[in-house]
Image: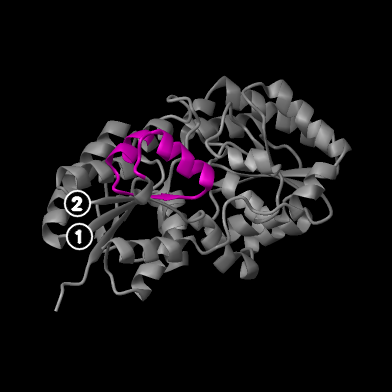
Amino acid sequence: MPRRRKILVLFGTRPEIIKLAPVIRELHKSSFMTTIVSSSQHRHLLEPFLKVFGVVPDHDLDLMRKDQTLNHICSEVIRSLDEIILTERPDVILVQGDTSTALAGAIAGFNCKIPVGHVEAGLRSGDRMSPYPEEMNRRIISQIADFHFAATEANRHRLLAEGITEKRIEVTGNTVVDTLTTYSAEVKPSKDLGEILGRARSMKLVLLTSHRRESFGSIMEQNLRVLSDFVRSRPDVCLLFPVHPNPNVGSAAGSIFADQERIYLVDPLDYNDFIAAMKAAWLVVSDSGGIQEEAPSLGKALLVLRENTERNEAIEAGVAKLVGGDPKKLKEMLESNYNDESWIESVRTIKNPFGDGTASKRIVAYLKKVL
């Protein structure tokens, strides 16, 4: 009787588990054996999501340290995976996205001659330093990976242009849509968030997230001041900001938004609360990559606080607009959409450019075919 194939699934951050949870669920339904490994790159942000999705790691690398560097993360993941790979003998290592955990997992797999599958392959901003270090992480993983699970046709074309063999690429859609399809209909906010959303029910709620390294410093501070002035000058607008634990974010938010009416600074939200907040939002403003896929999945207009994006499908579909690095442009876009809400209203009817909620099934079916 042939040995059952084993898939090692690696993650370490909140976006990774959001996008890998449906893949893990499909793997459990299949004939594959699975080994689940968490690097705990962002332990405090990750743990609540493990509970929501019912994912229990078989191995926890426990590498998170205060003021950890990118090189610390990579070296510890590679070192720790050596023993796990030797013990578990996986047939494929599955990584997701663009984190240091994903990059290190791909390198560890290559060094041990284990095939690597890359979920959400082929995203490119075109600027190797933005987003940093994610853009370069993705490029390197693409050179290592054996199986490339591209979310869109545009992602597939980018991989082909870089010399990736067509038979190694499978267009699947984005797995975040799978997660939202499963969970969004029944989410209910917690008591604390429910009170905030209750106060905001008759208002225009702006949901803000900002945490990217390239935003730290004066750019983030100027953007927060623009948002502060926008809320202060319009009594029917309020803002909800789940503040990332990075001190660069917390110190800027605390000083600029201190004691301001109708601005709610809260700790990072669990998955149910974040989706509930997004569903209640009038407008989403963010520098996040994943939110560029989540917002159109929920029919929400998004202003992207970045110079560029590796998710141009959202811009081209008309569900998101790129603000760039000039706070004056953010001010203009907030005011124009407040005065004319036609774009915000139109987003509700635009087809999601990131898939139909069956990406995880396609990934597992492809693995069955090639293994």
Q: Residue at x 26, y 46 (%)?
A: 105
In which quadrant will I find the N terminus? Answer: bottom left
Q: Is residue 359 left or right of residue 320?
A: left
The numbered mark at residue 114 is 2
- Tell me which numbered mark, 1 or 2, is placed earlier along the sequence: 1
Q: Is residue 335 above or below residue 15?
A: above
Q: CA distance from mark 1 to mark 2?
A: 7 Å
Q: Is residue 222 something that shows in the picture?
A: yes
Q: Amino acid at mark 2?
A: Ile
Front residue of this view, candidates 228 and 355: 355
Q: Which of the 4 quarters of the picture holds residue 145?
A: top left
Q: Is residue 47 left or right of residue 352?
A: left
Magenta span covers which residues?
A: 139-165
Helix or strand or loop: what does disc 1 sit on?
loop
Q: Residue at x 20, y 44 (%)?
A: 110
Q: Is residue 250 above or below residue 17?
A: above
Inspect the magenta stretch and tell me whether residue 140 lies in it: yes
Residue 259 x %, y %: 70, 37
The residue positioned farthest toward the front in the image shown: 166
Query: Mark 2, residues whose alpha carbon is within 10 Å: few (<14), some, or many (≥20)?
Result: some
Q: Are marks 1 and 2 in contact (CB under 8 Å)?
A: yes
The residue positioned farthest toward the bottom in the image shown: 1
Q: Residue at x 66, y 39 (%)?
A: 316
Residue 363 x %, y %: 40, 60
The numbered mark at residue 90 is 1
